[in-house]
């Protein structure tokens, strides 16, 4: 197995020119697809043999029974009274999860980066990383117990994987205070297993059984969780409304893409530029631009906001992304992204966002909306309306709290219409 440093060197070498970048991309895509299809077939077979099928209502009953069996009963709270303990490292965009958690009520946050630990060091999966993980878990447990002693915690929300969190820690919390444990994973299709991290693997496969809810943004992964004896709930990402611009700007960027330069993305940008599309790119790794501008400002200044729904090096394998809600929520420029059947559950395609199935379609759609800016603005406005109504992070948290029984269900979100 390649070491972390050797992998880094190989990636740098592969990106040195267009030919090696293309060959490396194809190799990584085939590797990813092979692993994904292997997991999909394995869990499909298990679910068929054991008559397991994801049904949200059945899952809700299972979740509540799991909590009840350990002798714990969730207290019903009003919005503003719910005490959340969140395990969220301050990495990349993760802080955008916090404002809507604060709207629920008192918020206690454990961020291991504040204690000198880094996610990059953990991802090296060596002896030092395993020791760091053990220290992080000991610190996390002590902070949970300290917060709970001051004010009872209503639920624990974790955005982490087996690189960072350990099953023994989760079981210890359940046994000692009983509060519901919820984990969120937004990339199950590519991070299900992972290297060994001392007590179990680095993905979700080893820790999922120790959560009361495994929140996944991939519907197909619900079978994977069921096959491991876990309690999945499908929910997509959301957006942080506090980041929305106060006013809409007149677009001065024809087409933009915001995101790091990795995987197949450079190949798509090269293709568009070769076809004379005036696209500007912003993010780590691009030669012509970096993160000098706030992404929200870029979204609001763009007539067309490009999305790429593929995973890593694969254009074929797609997943719902945070930008699928963050960009339409701005409401300034039309959002054009890869077609994904999961994403189609949350927007009216062609009316609120626009999707493409291949690069030819992408090129044609961009050319169309560049010459029909009024159509682009109408779609952008409709997408923003949908996001404000249904796709805040707060909507997701409230749904989780409803499922746990912390808040009362009442015809979907009608209970919160005056609050959102």
Image (cartoon, rainbow, N blue to C red):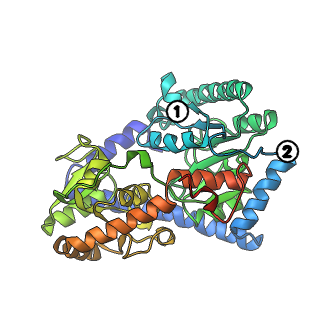
Q: Given this view, does label 1 or label 2 mark the residue nearer the observer?
A: 2
Lateral position of residue 52 relative to residue 109, left or right: right
The image quarter in which residue 379 lies: bottom left
Residue hosting label 2: 70
Tag on residue 126? 1
Q: Front-most of 232 and 254?
A: 254
Q: Residue at x 42, y 45 (%)?
A: 242
Q: Residue at x 20, y 46 (%)?
A: 289
The reply to whether residue 165 is visible in this rendering is no
Q: Residues within 10 Å of mark 1 (few under 14, many from 20)?
A: some
Q: Position of residue 170 (x, y in %)?
A: 71, 38
> Separation of disc 1 and disc 2 at Cα?
36 Å
Q: Position of residue 259 (x, y in %)?
A: 32, 51
Q: Secondary structure at mark 2?
A: loop
The reply to whether residue 149 is visible in this rendering is yes
Residue 277, above or below 258: below
Residue 268, above or below 401: below
Q: Front-most of 236 and 373?
A: 373
Q: Position of residue 126 (x, y in %)?
A: 52, 33
Are the residues at dot 1 and dot 2 in contact (C-beta closer than 8 Å)?
A: no
């Amino acid at each position: 197995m390649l070491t972390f440093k050797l992998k880094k060197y190989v990636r740098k070498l592969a990106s040195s020119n267009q030919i090696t970048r293309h060959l490396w991309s194809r190799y990584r895509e085939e590797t990813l697809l092979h692993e994904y299809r292997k997991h999909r077939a394995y869990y499909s077979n298990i679910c068929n043999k054991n008559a397991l099928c994801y049904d949200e209502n059945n899952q809700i009953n299972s979740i509540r029974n799991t909590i009840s069996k350990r002798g714990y009963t969730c207290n019903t709270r009003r919005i503003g009274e719910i005490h959340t303990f969140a395990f969220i490292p301050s990495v990349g965009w993760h802080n955008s999860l916090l404002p809507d958690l604060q709207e629920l009520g008192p918020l206690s946050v454990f961020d291991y980066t504040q204690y000198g630990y880094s996610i990059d060091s953990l991802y090296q999966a060596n002896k030092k990383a395993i020791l760091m993980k053990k220290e992080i878990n000991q610190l996390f447990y002590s902070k949970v117990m300290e917060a709970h002693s001051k004010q009872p915690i209503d639920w624990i929300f974790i955005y982490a994987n087996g690189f960072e969190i350990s099953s023994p820690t989760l079981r210890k919390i359940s046994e000692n205070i009983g509060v519901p444990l919820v984990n969120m994973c937004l990339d199950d299709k590519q991070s299900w297993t992972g290297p060994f991290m001392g007590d179990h693997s680095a993905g979700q496969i080893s820790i999922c059984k120790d959560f009361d809810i495994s929140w996944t943004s991939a519907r197909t992964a619900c079978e994977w969780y069921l096959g491991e004896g876990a309690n999945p709930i499908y929910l997509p990402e959301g957006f942080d409304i506090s980041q929305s611009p106060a006013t809409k700007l007149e677009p001065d960027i024809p087409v933009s893409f915001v995101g790091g330069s990795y995987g197949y993305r450079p190949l798509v940008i090269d293709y568009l530029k070769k076809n004379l599309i005036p696209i500007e790119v912003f993010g780590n790794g691009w030669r012509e631009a970096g993160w000098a501008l706030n992404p929200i400002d870029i979204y609001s200044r763009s007539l067309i906001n490009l999305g790429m729904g593929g995973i890593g090096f694969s254009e074929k394998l797609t997943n719902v992304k945070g930008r699928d809600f963050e960009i339409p929520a701005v409401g300034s420029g039309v959002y054009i992204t890869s077609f994904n059947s999961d994403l189609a559950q949350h927007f009216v395609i062609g009316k609120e966002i626009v999707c493409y199935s291949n690069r030819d379609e992408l090129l044609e759609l961009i050319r169309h909306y560049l010459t029909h800016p009024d159509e682009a603005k109408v779609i952008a406005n409709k997408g923003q309306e949908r996001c404000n109504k249904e796709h805040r992070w707060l909507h997701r948290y409230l749904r989780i709290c409803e499922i746990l029984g912390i808040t009362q269900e009442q015809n979907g979100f009608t209970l919160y219409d005056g609050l959102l």
